[in-house]
Image: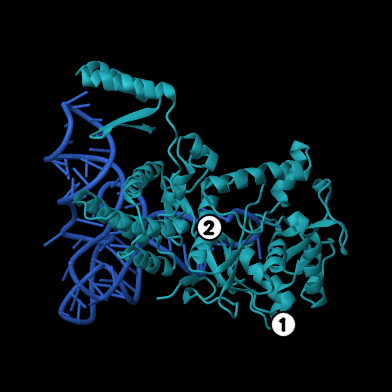
Chain colours: A cyan, B blue
RNA sequence: GGCGGGGUAGCCAAGUGGUAAGGCACGGCUCUGCAAAAGCUGCAUUCGUCGGUUCGAUUCCGACCCUCGCCUCCA
């Protein structure tokens, strides 16, 4: 079986074949953050999903170019800039930095390109000029430039590729008052927004006067600049299908006359504690909120990667606690394999990688892949107890695990060195145990626990673990 | 109102026209001074409800209920 993805464009699972004639290079564009605030756990689900696609394609041997845009000019940003009285760049920088810190905390690979909208104004302007030259964009009396869906359709193009649209049945927009604009048609969307007093210093010159780009056009301009007029994969949250992605298709195909993207992948949203995330319910978590509660980026990443990306996922704090236990189970097993591994890796028993690949090939069925991994852990544990695993077999299993982990990205960090004070207490406790003073030894155990260290007695002596 | 996802054990979550993966939690056992950790082991006669097709349905079809998303700048 070969790699396949559910393509929103086809509304079906399709075998993946890159546009590259050599079948090697793959371009991915994933809609990135709007840097007006910290990204929340729902945003992170989408970005971790993007990272999984990136890593799995590398695992499959493709030469991946991953692009993620930074939307650093937009209504909410401008409003905050006006309120805080600092420059646009000063404002967006703090959230952009936070975004990349969080991305790292979740062990996501850094995309190869992270273009900022404000640094691609010339590309955006030239794309709009092309659309105007082709007669499918126009400057309205309000000074803004709009995309004409009617003209676009008149050229034989299809508006409504990702979602079924029925304009007659649509309700008038609730977020944007339609009477604010002088668009020819309600469905038309802005490519270039004319400067208004509230914009302050946030504007750029253009052939249509001072203003700023619309949201959709920036993604078209930046994705095509880096990946070319046609590329393989475009990812994003399911809410972006319409209008954002539909409009990207219209602008790009309208300007180039070529198919824009071959595969569109959309990640589902998540619920938190069974409810839609909202600030009033207190279930609105940023990554920082969760780290402050003592969870690690690794645990959060694991939990986000346990569910199929196209299904709504219920993210809970209990689930996060469970993730800690599940990871510990894997760590324990891998740790034992490391202790045993030696010599030339013997990869005779490699069923796991076959099953793992089959699961992920099937539209990234991670749940099934985890089931295989835990079955492998079970088997390894059994063989470790039975002593039927040779050191070279252990090395082979470990090598395979590392390959799988290059996709999952949940490698454990090296254990911290125990401070001298803690080691001294541990030695005192051992002396007490030796003289059968268990009361004293239990007291020291409690004391260590209070300091954040757990003692585990084993036949080979006590082990220290950081809480 | 239109369009599109979902409803599987206490919780999370795979899956299939032939009798329910995996994880967490929980119980038993091994080990242990006691613990902890770890290991082993047990844990859904049943897949939202009601009908239909079928030798057989959780899986296909229909109706209904519940839930989530989009419907013009929300991942």
Regarding residue A261, the answer to whether it shows in the image is: yes
Q: Secondary structure at mark 2?
A: helix
* Dots 1, 2 in contact, CB < 8 A: no
Q: Residue at x 45, y 39 (%)?
A: A295
Compare marks 1 and 2 and give the one earlier in the sequence: 2
Q: Is residue A406 above or below residue A157?
A: above
Chain under numbered label 1? A
Q: Is residue A209 above or below residue A301?
A: below
Is residue A222 toward the left or the right of residue A370 in the image?
right
Q: Quadrant of residue B72?
A: bottom right
The N terminus of chain A lies in quadrant? bottom left
Q: Residue at x 73, y 42 (%)?
A: A91
Residue A249 place in picture, x, y as percent? 65, 71
Residue A54 place in picture, x, y as percent? 54, 62
Q: Secondary structure at mark 1?
A: loop
Q: Which label number is shown at residue A51?
A: 2
Q: Residue at x 30, y 64 (%)?
A: A349
How far apart are the two marked residues, 1 and 2, measured between alpha carbons? Answer: 37 Å
Residue B21 place in picture, x, y as percent? 26, 59
Q: In front: A196, or A67?
A: A67
Residue under label 1: A155
Q: Quadrant of residue A28?
A: bottom right
């Amino acid at each position: 079986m070969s790699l396949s993805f559910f393509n929103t464009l086809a509304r079906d699972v399709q075998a993946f074949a890159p546009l590259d004639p050599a079948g090697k290079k793959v371009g991915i564009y994933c809609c990135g953050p709007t840097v007006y605030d910290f990204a929340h756990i729902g945003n992170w689900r989408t970005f971790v999903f993007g990272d999984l696609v990136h890593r799995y394609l590398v695992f499959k041997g493709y030469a991946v170019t991953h692009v993620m845009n930074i939307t650093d000019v937009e209504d909410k940003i401008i409003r905050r800039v006006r309120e805080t009285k600092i420059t646009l760049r000063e404002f967006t920088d703090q959230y952009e930095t936070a975004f990349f810190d969080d991305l790292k905390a979740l062990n996501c690979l850094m995309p190869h390109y992270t273009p900022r909208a404000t640094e691609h104004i010339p590309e955006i302007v030239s794309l709009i000029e092309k659309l105007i030259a082709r007669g499918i964009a126009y400057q309205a009396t309000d000074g803004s430039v709009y995309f004409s869906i009617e003209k676009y359709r008149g050229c034989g193009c299809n508006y409504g590729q990702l979602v079924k649209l029925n304009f007659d049945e649509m309700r008038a927009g609730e977020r944007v008052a339609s009477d604010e604009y002088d668009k020819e048609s309600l469905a038309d969307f802005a490519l270039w927004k004319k400067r208004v007093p509230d914009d302050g210093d946030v504007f750029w010159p253009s052939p249509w006067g001072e203003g700023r780009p619309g949201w959709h056009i920036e993604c078209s301009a930046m994705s095509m600049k880096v990946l070319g007029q046609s590329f393989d994969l475009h990812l994003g949250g399911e809410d972006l299908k319409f209008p954002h992605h539909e409009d990207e298709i219209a602008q790009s195909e309208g300007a180039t006359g070529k198919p824009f993207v071959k595969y569109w992948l959309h990640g589902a949203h998540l619920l938190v504690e069974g409810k839609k995330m909202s600030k009033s319910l207190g279930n609105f978590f940023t990554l920082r909120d969760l780290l402050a509660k003592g969870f690690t980026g690794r645990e959060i990443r694991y939990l986000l990667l346990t569910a199929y990306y196209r299904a709504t996922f219920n993210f809970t704090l209990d689930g996060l606690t469970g993730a800690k236990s599940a990871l510990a189970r894997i760590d324990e097993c891998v740790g034992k394999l490391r202790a045993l591994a030696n010599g030339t890796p013997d990869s005779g028993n490699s069923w796991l990688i076959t099953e793992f690949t089959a699961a992920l090939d099937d539209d990234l069925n991670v749940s099934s892949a985890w089931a295989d991994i835990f079955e492998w852990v079970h088997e390894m544990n059994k063989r470790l107890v039975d002593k039927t695993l040779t050191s070279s077999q252990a090395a082979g299993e470990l090598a395979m695990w590392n390959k799988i982990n290059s996709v999952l990205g949940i490698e454990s960090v090296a254990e911290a060195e125990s401070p001298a004070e803690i080691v001294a207490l541990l030695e005192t406790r051992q002396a007490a145990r030796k003289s059968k003073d268990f009361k004293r030894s239990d007291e020291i155990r409690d004391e260590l626990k209070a300091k954040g260290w757990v003692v585990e007695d084993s036949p080979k002596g006590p082990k220290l673990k950081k809480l």
